[in-house]
Image (cartoon, grey):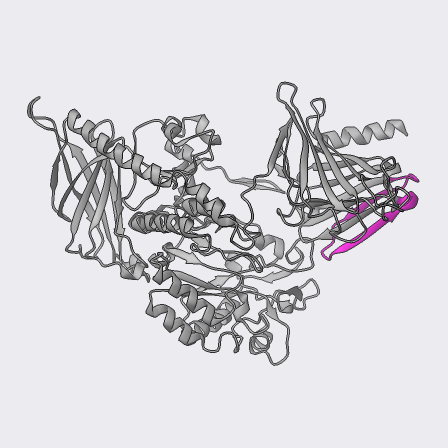
């Protein structure tokens, strides 16, 4: 470790990424505790299933449809007024009864707890916390009060052992009394509303235990490493509404991730696996069945993550660290010795995916209840992977269930793998109450040229005190081109399997090929049928794709069908995403009036021109949208070849066909350009400009929200810049000051808008309102050069 007054740097040396991760995470953070096996099943969630009756109905539907699932999550609306450890007695009159009902059909229940405790007299949790003096303090030494779901809240100081003990008693009482299986610790950044940083001030005080740092500012405790392999995104997407095609593809990938959970926000369409019609439902059932077959492998990977710190899911370059081309690959990932080919596209169709595999032997495999629409699976030569039967939930599993080993021999005719087993819950794994079996396979030398080759499979060794169950061991020895030979024996005994001759392998491949053709014919129109179903589903909409614009150093995504909005603006050299929001709101919007989200914000725009000159390295997109009353809003977006870091946007409101008697002019309109910019480091973000009258202005992000209107000679003189003083990256926005009558700055949670407002007036065909502006990213060195140039001009 090298010490400096400002920075501590640790350098870890190793021969392989796995070695580096093991050393780094074991030293800095420790490793993950082994999760219970039920936590590796599929989880279903929503903000919110708002009544106990709805929760029960969702769980029952999973069982009726034979859709594997282990866990239902209860979001914040089960509480009374968002107060932790309380229940809305109308919506959830008997939490214990609901838990019992879920348990009776094999479900676990996870309930949310937020660390923001409502400031309210006679609220037991708040009163007991005051008495025990458990709250994070502000600089004044008094409890810090922020705002979250319940309104004014205080925050337990979990850096202190006394506070952790106080909180654990509350949790234990809550869990035992209500049959709770797991806690959802949400908003634990901690999230604080109405602040630019989205969290508490860095100057807040934690009274931590001496062994972890003692009394320190918030910044000391909240900047740390986290070795967390148990992760995965919300399947279907939390924000907005999934389409059938998107949900089907997402489930195919999501079912293969370490944490597999469907989740969505309020006021969106249903996103359970059956919500998008029968075709998607069938594919989701196949995807989840595949996950449950692989649970023995997942559980083994989590045990290895606990013991060695190696992630459950790793990038493709872990398969061959010497191959630099794999470091940029994002179309697949590894689960131990299994490679999941994440997607097939027109650019990479399924029949060409094998060409993109890492070096070595990779044997493709699938299960009988599978679909060609799911991601392809490959087993690395030299690997053995344990699998089990399809289950509706992990509680159905029995120690005596048949274990199936998938085996792919390497170029030396060998393979090895491991299976970890225990009771599936609790902490027995810390006391040798487990069984860790190392299997190996070896191709034997042929006694003569005329004899068939044999492969012997056996237990090489084992660890732990958990007794080996009396069960069958089924072998699937993969031969290539999805052909295989199979065999069975009692687990623990040695098995020999004869390999087929080359002619017999060709025959097996031909049979498999016929089967796959039949399957492909059955499902090749899958997505088309899904699209036909969508028209009858409320809110699903069409399967539409954003337009990608990429030239120079800038990449944009534009969504024509919702206001022509720009939803992504990435500066490629720095990797900075400059826009905050999503398809339906935020990002880059434009309005036709002073009202927020007035006409022009959500209307459908048409692409009138799209030119890409790949040789010259520039791209142009022209959009138009009808906003009513004979008015058209248009937007031209240009990334020019001579300015690779710059995006030029020219927007107009013009009259095309105003009504008779109007004198050829329209209603009063105003062009309002509304880009919502993302702040990577909110409290290190500043807005700088020189006003028309020559004054220098610097606006700092404050903890509280704020809106600043800038008019007259106080307006920026055609340029303002948003700087991140921590990274030295800035976004410069230049505009024609004669087209802009007002500028508006509005600080939000982790974001800021830099708005340009035109004058308000009627328009005609000859007198449109126009705002032409450009944005570009620059580094600190260029900012200094610009500053020196400004000094020279003065």
Residue 210: where, in percent of width, then height?
Answer: 53, 60
Image quarter where the C terminus lies is top right
Q: Position of residue 49 (x, y in %)?
A: 50, 65
Residue 701 visible in the current orientation? yes
Q: How many numbered markers are drawn?
A: 0
Q: Locate residue 343 relative to residue 681 in the image: left or right.
A: left
The residue shown at (62%, 21%) is 614
Left or right of 534: which side holds 205? Answer: right
User: Going by the picture, which residue comes out furthest to the top?
Assistant: 615
Q: Is 694 colored magenta in this rendering?
A: yes
The front one of 731 and 104 is: 104
Task: Answer whether residue 16 is magenta in the image.
Answer: no
Up/down of 38 relative to 79, above or below: above
Residue 108 is at least partly visible in this image: no
Image position of 215 with respect to 151: above or below: above
* Among the 4 quarters of the image, the one containing residue 131: bottom right
Q: Residue at x 83, y 43 (%)?
A: 658
Task: Read off the magenta span.
Answer: 691-714
Q: Is residue 433 left or right of residue 3?
A: left
Q: Position of residue 334 (x, y in %)?
A: 38, 39
Q: Position of residue 89 (x, y in %)?
A: 52, 78
Q: Nearer the viewer, residue 342 or 125?
A: 342
């Amino acid at each position: 470790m090298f010490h400096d007054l400002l920075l501590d740097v640790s350098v870890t040396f190793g021969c392989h990424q796995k070695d580096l991760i093991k050393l780094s995470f074991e030293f800095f953070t420790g490793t993950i505790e082994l999760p219970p096996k039920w936590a590796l099943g599929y989880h279903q969630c929503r903000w919110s299933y708002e009544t106990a009756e709805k929760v029960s109905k969702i769980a029952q539907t999973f069982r009726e449809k034979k859709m594997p699932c282990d866990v239902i999550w209860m979001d914040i609306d089960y509480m009374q007024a968002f107060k932790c450890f309380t229940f809305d007695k109308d919506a959830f009159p008997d939490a214990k009864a609901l838990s019992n009902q879920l348990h009776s059909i094999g479900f676990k229940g996870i309930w949310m707890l937020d660390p923001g405790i409502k400031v309210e007299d006679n609220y037991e949790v708040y009163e007991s916390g005051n008495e025990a003096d458990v709250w994070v303090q502000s600089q004044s030494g008094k409890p810090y009060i922020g705002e979250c779901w319940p309104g004014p809240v205080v925050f337990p100081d979990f850096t202190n052992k006394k506070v952790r003990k106080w909180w654990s008693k509350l949790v234990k009482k809550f869990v035992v009394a209500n049959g709770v299986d797991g806690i959802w610790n949400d908003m634990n950044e901690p999230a604080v509303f109405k602040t630019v940083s989205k969290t508490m001030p860095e100057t807040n005080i934690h009274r931590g235990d001496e062994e972890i740092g003692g009394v320190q500012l918030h910044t000391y405790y909240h900047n740390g490493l986290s070795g967390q392999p148990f992760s995965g995104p919300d399947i279907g997407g939390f924000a907005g509404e999934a389409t059938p095609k998107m949900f089907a593809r997402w489930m195919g990938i999501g079912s293969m991730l370490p944490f597999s959970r469907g989740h969505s926000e309020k006021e969106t369409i249903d996103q359970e696996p059956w919500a998008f019609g029968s075709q998607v439902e069938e594919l989701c059932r196949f995807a989840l069945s595949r996950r449950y077959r692989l649970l023995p492998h997942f559980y083994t990977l989590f045990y290895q993550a606990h013991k060695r710190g190696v992630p459950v899911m790793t990038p493709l370059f872990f398969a061959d660290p010497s191959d630099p081309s794999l470091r940029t690959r994002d179309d697949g990932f590894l689960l131990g010795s299994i490679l999941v080919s994440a997607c097939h596209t027109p650019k990479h169709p399924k029949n060409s995916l094998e060409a993109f595999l890492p070096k070595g032997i990779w044997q493709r495999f699938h299960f009988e209840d599978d679909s060609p629409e799911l991601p392809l699976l490959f087993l690395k030569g030299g690997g053995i992977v344990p699998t089990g039967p399809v289950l509706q939930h992990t509680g159905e599993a029995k120690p005596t269930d048949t274990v199936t080993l998938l085996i792919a021999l390497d170029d030396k005719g060998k393979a090895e793998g491991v299976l970890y087993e225990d009771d599936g819950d609790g902490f027995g794994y810390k006391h040798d109450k487990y069984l860790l079996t190392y299997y190996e396979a070896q191709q034997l030398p042929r006694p003569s040229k005329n004899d068939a080759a044999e492969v012997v499979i056996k237990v090489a060794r084992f660890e732990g005190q958990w007794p080996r169950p009396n069960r069958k061991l089924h072998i699937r020895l993969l031969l290539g081109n999805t052909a295989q030979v199979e065999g069975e024996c009692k687990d623990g005994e040695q098995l020999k399997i004869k390999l087929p001759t080359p002619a017999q392998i060709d025959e097996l491949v031909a049979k498999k090929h016929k089967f796959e053709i039949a399957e492909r014919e059955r499902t090749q129109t899958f997505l088309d049928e899904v699209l036909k179903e969508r028209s009858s589903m409320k809110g699903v909409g069409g399967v539409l794709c954003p337009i990608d614009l990429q030239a120079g150093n800038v990449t944009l995504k534009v969504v024509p069908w919702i206001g022509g909005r720009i939803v992504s603006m990435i500066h490629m050299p720095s990797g900075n995403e400059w826009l905050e929001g999503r398809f339906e709101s935020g990002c880059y919007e434009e309005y036709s009036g002073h009202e927020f989200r007035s006409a022009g914000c959500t209307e459908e725009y048409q692409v009138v021109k799209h030119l890409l000159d790949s040789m010259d390295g520039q791209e142009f997109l022209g959009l138009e949208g009808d906003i009513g009353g004979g008015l058209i809003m248009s937007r031209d977006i240009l990334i020019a070849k001579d300015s690779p870091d710059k995006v030029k946007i020219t927007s107009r409101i013009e009259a095309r066909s105003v009504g008779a008697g109007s004198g050829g002019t329209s209603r009063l309109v105003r062009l309002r350009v509304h880009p919502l910019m993302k702040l990577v480091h909110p409290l290190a973000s500043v807005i700088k400009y020189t006003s028309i009258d020559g004054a220098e202005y610097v606006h700092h992000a404050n903890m509280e929200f704020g809106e600043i209107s800038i008019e007259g000679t106080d307006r920026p003189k055609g340029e303002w810049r948003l700087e991140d003083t921590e990274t030295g990256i800035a976004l410069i926005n230049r505009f024609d000051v004669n087209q802009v009558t007002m500028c508006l700055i509005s600080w939000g949670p982790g974001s800021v808008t830099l708005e340009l407002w035109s004058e308000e007036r009627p328009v005609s065909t000859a007198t449109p309102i126009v705002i032409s502006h450009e944005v570009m990213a620059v580094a600190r060195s260029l900012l200094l050069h610009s500053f020196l140039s400004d000094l020279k001009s003065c």
